[in-house]
Amino acid sequence: MNGKEFDTYKVGTTANSTSTMHKLASTPITLDCFETDDLQDVIIEDSDNPMFIVTSNYAANTFIIWLEELRQKYNETKNKKYWKELIRWLPESWLQTRTVTLNYENLRSIYSQRKNHKLSEWHSFCKWVESLPYAKELILIN
């Protein structure tokens, strides 16, 4: 789930996450480093070409190769211009570990606001909330 989306919920929560600044250069950048659950080809309409398909896997892999080259160049030279460029272009789908401490009151608020959200990650989160003990009595009530 997107950290920026989750940061909306600050009251009564504790959160920490892995540091992009300190961890980004330590491991190779691959497709597995990104959220790709619903990655699919996109059909784009163009006035010159009525319909053509942009292959998301091709675009993603090309971009990831470029990011990995920046990472390697930074590790070789320690020149911060490569690291800064890597940070600048890191997409929203970059996966990071985030640990949060919430109570049922927080979860009730999050659930009611996000259960019909357009991002599929929120639907997964809400399914998890529904599975908690006493969720029906304390979280899912109207």
Image (tube, grey):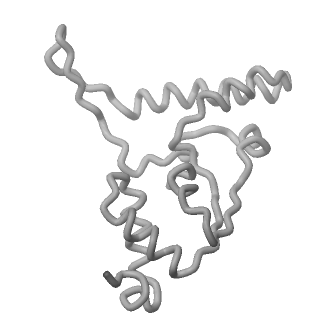
Locate residue 134 relative to residue 38 in the image: left or right.
right
| Residue 54 picture quarter | top left
The residue at the point 40 percent across, 65 percent down is: 124
- Residue 5, image x and y in percent? 50, 52
Q: Furthest-left residue in view?
A: 50
| Residue located at (49% from left, 31% from top) | 61
Q: Is residue 113 left or right of residue 90?
A: left
Q: Residue 118's x, y, as percent?
A: 32, 52
Question: Where does the image place residue 90, in percent across and percent down from the top left?
Answer: 59, 34
**Residue beneath the point at 32% across and 40% down:** 40
Say which residue appears at 55% left-offset and 62% top-offset: 9
* Residue reaching furthest to the top: 48
From what the image shows, is residue 8 above or below residue 21?
below
Q: Is residue 43 above or below residue 119?
A: above
Q: x, y (%) of residue 91?
A: 54, 36
User: Total of numbered circles in the picture?
Assistant: 0
Position of 88 relative to 115 (above/below): above
Decide which of 50, 28 is in the foreground and name it: 50
Q: Is residue 108 above or below residue 24?
A: below
Q: Residue furthest right?
A: 78
Tell me: 54 left or right of 110: left
Relative placement, left or right, of 130 versus 88 is: left
Question: In which quarter of the view is residue 126 placed?
Answer: bottom left
Quadrant containing the C terminus in the rendered view: bottom left
